[in-house]
Image: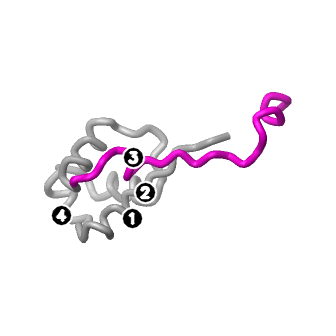
Amino acid sequence: MSRIKIELEKVLKERKISKNQLCYACKLQHTQLNNYCKNKVVRVDLATIAKICDYAGCSIADILVLEKDEEPEQEIAEK
């Protein structure tokens, strides 16, 4: 089964943005941001992603990446 991977930490490093800067600018809790950076978010808040993209000057596709499962679809249907 495919899954969404959050690559926020990579984007922050590429753009030389600290987590503190992002938390302050986007009014995020440090815990919330750390969960996004560690890919521990189950439900993504679109308003939060929009704020992050605006501040970082990136697109949603830079942060959210679809990881395809290597298991053939036929095998998934049989399960």
Spot occupied by residue 19 in the image (x, y as percentages of width and height): 26, 65
> Quick check: is 65 in the magenta stretch?
yes
> Mark 2 Cα within 10 Å, few/some/many (few <14, many 20+)?
some
Residue assigned mark 4: 21
Q: Residue at x 85, y 29 (%)?
A: 78
Q: Please, what is the three-letter code of the amino acid marked with disc 3?
A: Ala
Residue assigned mark 3: 61
Residues at circles 3 and 4 in contact by the CB criterion of under 8 Å = no
> Quick check: is 33 in the magenta stretch?
no
> Mark 3 Cα within 10 Å, few/some/many (few <14, many 20+)?
few
Q: Using the image as rendered, state which of residue 15 and residue 18 is in the foreground.
A: 15
- Closest to the camera, between mark 3 and mark 1, is 3
Residues at circles 2 and 1 in contact by the CB criterion of under 8 Å = yes
Disc 4/disc 1 C-alpha distance (Å) = 15 Å
Q: Secondary structure at mark 2?
A: loop
Magenta span of residues: 57-79
Q: Residue at x 32, y 36 (%)?
A: 46
Residue assigned mark 1: 10
Residue assigned mark 2: 7
Q: Secondary structure at mark 3?
A: helix
Disc 3/disc 2 C-alpha distance (Å) = 9 Å
Q: Quadrant of the N terminus?
A: top right
Q: Residue furthest left?
A: 25
Q: Which of the two discs, 3 and 4, labels the residue nearer the N terminus?
A: 4
Q: Please, what is the three-letter code of the amino acid marked with disc 2?
A: Glu
